[in-house]
Image (tube, rainbow, N blue to C red):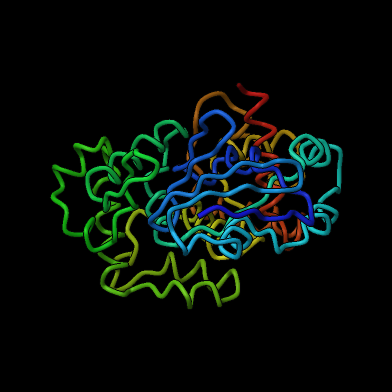
Amino acid sequence: MEFTVSLDSPFSLEHTLKSGQLFRWRKRGEWWYGVVSGSVLKIQQDGDTLRCITGSDRLDSGFVTNYFKLDEDLEHVLGTLTKDEVVTRAIEKYYGLRLVRQETWECLGSFVLATNANIPRIEKMVAAICARYGTRFEFEGDSYSSFPAPGVLAGAAMADLRACGLGYRAPFLKHVAASVADGKIDFDGLAALPFEDSRKVLLKELLGEKVLLGVGPKVADCVLLYSCGKDEAFPIDVWIARVLAKSYPRLIDSSLRARLARDGKIKLSYGDYLRLSQSVRKHFGRYAGYAQQYLYMDAREREA
């Protein structure tokens, strides 16, 4: 099936797909290929038009509009964020970058694997579990695999998961998959909750054990931002915390700022994370997640 989507507001397919939100997209020539919703979406941007090819009737223009949040007024969103030179410069450089609406289980499983790993490593791990446990299908003569269902990963042998290169993340992924398969998390209900409540659901403890073992506040914020429409979520790791410390020192308390200024890696405590998250969200407002994405892209290029 071939179709086009007309763009009525700013959008950059390139910036969006390279922004670290997604791990199953590859560029071949002028086309991007992504495994989405159990099929392949082949897409190319030509000015204010997206050209799309897919083998699934489900991946229609409505799906593309929803997936890339083309129904969100990006000009209004970015207009609320141009508070200073730092974020304004990043927005100008990566104008058109949008947040996406991923399938929640795939987003959760992927970001459990993303802890302490760079993007190429994450992509490799995700590709490995999909190849081993996903449902295979073909598109344009090539073989692809869907993201594995939670029940499949919950039943996987630990040794086989580790063979996919997951390392210490293997038991975390297996536990999270089992929690989802057992119905302990209602994803639809999660999206309907206010931000703070939805994060508490992902992080809550049940009988002294976390429902989603291995899901810390950063993973929770990624899931809420990239799949649940919580645009105020602001995922923070030590790397982005250092960016904040350099460009927005007044948002960070002095003791944490001093630790971030030192050489070497440090781990943000749960309390550090929540305090910094609250401070940054208060500063940037309801679209803080967009600010994070633009600042991340700008800082990543500077570090490259």
Q: Position of residue 11 (x, y in %)?
A: 72, 48
What residue appears at the point 15 percent right and 43 percent down from the top-left corner? 160
Query: Of 169 and 109, which appears nearest the observer?
Result: 109
155 with respect to 142 (left or right): left
The quadrant of the image that shows the C terminus is top right
Q: Is residue 225 visible?
A: no
- Tell how many labels: 0
- Given residues 268 and 171, the one toward you in this image is 171
The residue that appears at 83% across and 41% down in the rendered structure is 88
Residue 223: x and y in percent read: 50, 58
58 to the left or right of 281? left
Q: Classify residue 297 by image quadrant.
A: top right
Q: Can residue 240 be seen here? A: yes
**Nearest to the observer: residue 232 or residue 31:** 31
Q: Is residue 142 left or right of residue 280?
A: left
Task: From this view, report whether residue 285 is shown above or below residue 259.
Answer: below
Q: In the picture shown, does residue 235 fall above or below 58?
A: above
Quadrant location of residue 113? top left
Look at 86% across and 48% down and name the residue there.
Answer: 83
Residue in front for this viewpoint, 148 or 278: 148
**Percent coordinates x, y for residue 30 in the rendering:** 59, 32
> Which x, y percent locates residue 24?
44, 43
